[in-house]
Image (cartoon, rainbow, N blue to C red):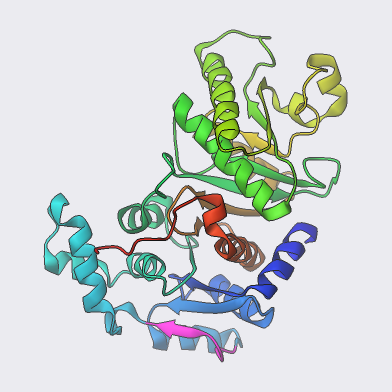
Amino acid sequence: MRFIGTIIEKLQRHPKRVVFPEGAEARVLQSARQFLALRLGAPILLGDRTKIKEIAADLNISLEGIRIINPAESEELENFGRRFYSLRREKGIKEAEAREAMRQPNYFGAMMVAMHQADGLISGVNHITGSVLRPLFQIIKVAPKSSTASSCMVMEVEDSRIGEKGVLFMADCGVVPEPTVEQLAEIALSTAQLARHLMDVKPRVAMLSFSTKGSATHPSIGKVQAATALARQKAERKMFEADFDGELQVDAALVPDIADKKCSDSKVAGKANVLIFPDLNSGNIASKLVRLVGKANAYGNILLGLDRPAADVSRGSNAHDILGVAAIVGAQAIAYEDLFPGAGKNLPGD
């Protein structure tokens, strides 16, 4: 709670509106109640009003102060449907299909965020990643000066010697299966920017591999090396201060004694606070291992590179995890354009 406590304090000074499309889920109801009780802003639940009230009553959760919207009965349904049709008509969607899509909470919630009726979106408790990402990519899309949408897990472990006082930013753990050199560099930069934004520290970014500084040879290692160089160039062009190094094995990235043996001249090795994985397989597996075996507090996946703040949480998340993700998404929304210049300027369908 050390890390998330500082995020909560920041959001209490700048409360935000967060929409939860899975409003009838018990864990979401519990986190929404906590979100309001902690004065983090206004939670918005989507779903059938009667069902939400019944589940809340069974859990003895007060809904006072929590907004509930049933997309199928909303006065915005027609407007949202028209805007979605305008966005997707070139893809062959019919007006009736666009309106029907807006009855689905993930689509309705994405449109709420796109229309500035909410500041961020949290979904995924009962949905696979594709069901969460598809509406976001179709409605919110990638931020104007971003080329890649990706995701980041924020992990808080007990050992404060690891990462930044026990906090690690790990990417990509949920979106890009086989990133190109360009995508890997963009993922590294976006994740570093999030680390700076949330913790106000200098990012030390380890580009991970099964090799450290040429200890093995393989085409995938060359990709990590090239992405490291490109990430440095991108950061320099943006005048963003961060250290990038790779390729590094994860022990060389995190353990000072091992770093001294393998790459003693590195500014990152042994003290990395951002870990960038070469592909989605390694990122997803590693993040779940850290959470389950290391018993870490896991917050994510925080989506990066989109035009508005959003997150796709794991179906294994508990109410505390969801609250933490909501706080992070809200904190992003405080100064989202600092992360992604030009984001949030345009309304969908205009």
- Give the quarter of the figure containing the C terminus: bottom left
- Give the quarter of the figure containing the N terminus: bottom right
Residue located 47% across and 72% down the image: 19
Q: Quadrant of residue 231?
A: top right
Q: Is residue 79 above or below residue 59?
A: above
Q: Quadrant of residue 115?
A: bottom left
Q: Seen in the image, is 185 located left or right of residue 261?
A: left
Whether residue 79 appears in magenta in the rendering, the answer is no
Q: Position of residue 56 (x, y in %)?
A: 54, 85
Q: Nearer the viewer, residue 145 or 270?
A: 145
Q: Position of residue 65 (x, y in %)?
A: 56, 89
Residue located 51% across and 35% down the image: 186
Which secondary structure is most common in the magenta stretch?
Answer: loop
Q: Position of residue 302 (x, y in %)?
A: 55, 53
Residue located 42% across and 55% down the image: 307
Q: Nearer the viewer, residue 315 or 333?
A: 333
Residue 275 appears in the picture as rendered: yes
Q: How many marks?
A: 0
Residue located 60% across and 86% down the image: 61
Q: Seen in the image, is 264 located left or right of residue 245?
A: right
Whether residue 63 appears in magenta in the rendering, the answer is yes
Q: Seen in the image, is 324 located left or right of residue 178?
A: right
Residue 313 appears in the picture as rendered: no
Q: Seen in the image, is 254 located left or right of residue 13?
A: right
Magenta-colored span: 62-69
Q: Is residue 349 above or below residue 177?
A: below
Q: Is residue 5 above or below residue 298?
A: below
Q: Position of residue 309 (x, y in %)?
A: 49, 59
